[in-house]
Image (cartoon, rainbow, N blue to C red):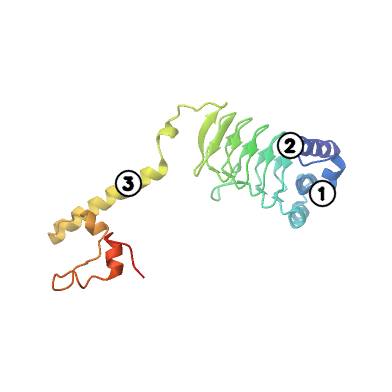
């Protein structure tokens, strides 16, 4: 336990330029405190004292703002920076050298049994607010961008960004992957537009009405003519809206 504590403190000193000395890290860093409490909770869990282990993990959450399930497997040398809002699930595995920033979730999807949380290999960096959800592996040296939602396996030394997460770099170079050629948001919009067209065609057959949308129907221009067709009734606001002149006070 003390060997892992020393490794955790060394990881904090190595990864945080604001860290001045090891004593200060041990005394004040909530990430180091949370990992130390987790070691004890994990020991209790493996001794089948699961209720006491859960109580310990919840007490640590109250103190640090970091929630780690007692069954999670975390090696020494992990650095949780700031830590507020970090959640690590039951079957998650975190290897040495991993850096986790605030707001990160290592969670599962749904209520499936067995391995349902991610395995984070060595030297991975998970930026603030990222969500890694599912029982897959994030490869060694990978980087997860802030706010990314990762739902599938990440290759080693890859950079993942976006919602859902997409690989944009591998070892600093842009990969030629099929996922790069498909924008899920654009695809969803295309499907919705196609479905709307089919609904309009079906409605047109029922009512006999042709659905043709001209530009002015999409963006109606205010009627500047009076009921008698004269221009003298047009308001100054309508003239300004039509671009005929600035609105005078």
Residue 218 in the image, given as x and y percentages of width and height: 26, 57
Contact between marks 2 and 1 (CB within 8 A): the answer is no
User: Which residue bears the numbered disc 1?
Assistant: 28
Q: Along the polypeptide, which appears first: circle 3 or circle 2?
A: 2
Q: Secondary structure at mark 2?
A: helix
Camera-side residue: 109 or 52?
109
Q: Secondary structure at mark 3?
A: helix
Camera-side mark, 3 or 2: 2
Q: Which part of the image, by quadrant, shows the N terminus?
A: top right
At 77% from the left and 56% from the top, the residue drawn is 63
Mark 1: few, some, or many residues within 10 Å (few <14, many ≥20)?
A: few
106 on left or right of 27 = left
**C-alpha gap between disc 3 and disc 2:** 45 Å
Taking depth in this image into account, of 237 and 21 the one nearest to the observer is 237
Name which quarter of the figure residue 99 lies in: top right
Name the residue rendered at 63%, 30% in the picture.
141
Pointers 3 and 2 in contact (C-beta within 8 Å) = no
Q: Secondary structure beneath disc 1?
A: helix
Task: Name the side, left or right, on which 136 lies relative to 69.
Answer: left
Residue 153, located in which quarter of the rendered image?
Answer: top right
- The numbered mark, 3 or 1, whose residue comes first in the sequence reads 1
Residue underneath mark 2: 15
The picture places residue 95, in percent across and down from the top left corner, at 70, 35
Q: Nearer the viewer, mark 3 or mark 1?
A: 1
Distance from the alpha carbon under mark 2 to that under mark 1:
16 Å
Residue under circle 3? Answer: 191
Left of 216 or right of it: where is 67? Answer: right
Residue at x 50% of width, y 28% of height: 174
Q: CA distance from mark 3 to mark 1?
A: 52 Å
């Amino acid at each position: 336990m003390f060997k892992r504590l020393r490794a955790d403190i060394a990881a904090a000193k190595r990864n945080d330029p604001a860290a001045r000395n090891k004593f200060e890290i041990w005394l004040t860093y909530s990430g180091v405190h949370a990992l130390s409490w987790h070691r004890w909770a994990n020991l209790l869990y493996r001794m089948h004292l699961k209720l006491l282990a859960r109580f310990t993990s919840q007490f640590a959450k109250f103190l640090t703002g970091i929630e780690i399930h007692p069954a999670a497997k975390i090696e020494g040398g992990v650095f949780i920076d700031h830590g507020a809002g970090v959640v690590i699930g039951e079957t998650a595995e975190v290897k040495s050298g991993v850096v986790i920033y605030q707001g990160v979730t290592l969670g599962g999807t749904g209520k499936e049994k067995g391995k349902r949380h991610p395995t984070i290999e060595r030297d991975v960096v998970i930026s603030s607010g990222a969500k890694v959800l599912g029982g897959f592996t994030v490869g060694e040296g990978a980087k997860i961008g802030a706010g990314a939602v990762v739902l599938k396996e990440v290759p080693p030394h890859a950079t993942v960004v976006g919602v859902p997460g997409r690989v944009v770099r591998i070892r600093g170079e842009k990969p030629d992957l099929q996922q790069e050629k498909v924008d899920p948001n654009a695809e969803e919009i295309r499907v919705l537009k196609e479905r709307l067209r089919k609904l309009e065609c079906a409605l047109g057959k029922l009512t006999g009405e042709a659905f043709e949308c001209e530009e002015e129907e999409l963006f109606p221009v205010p009627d500047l003519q009076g009921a008698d067709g004269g221009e003298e009734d047009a308001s100054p606001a309508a003239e300004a809206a039509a671009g005929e002149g600035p609105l005078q006070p």
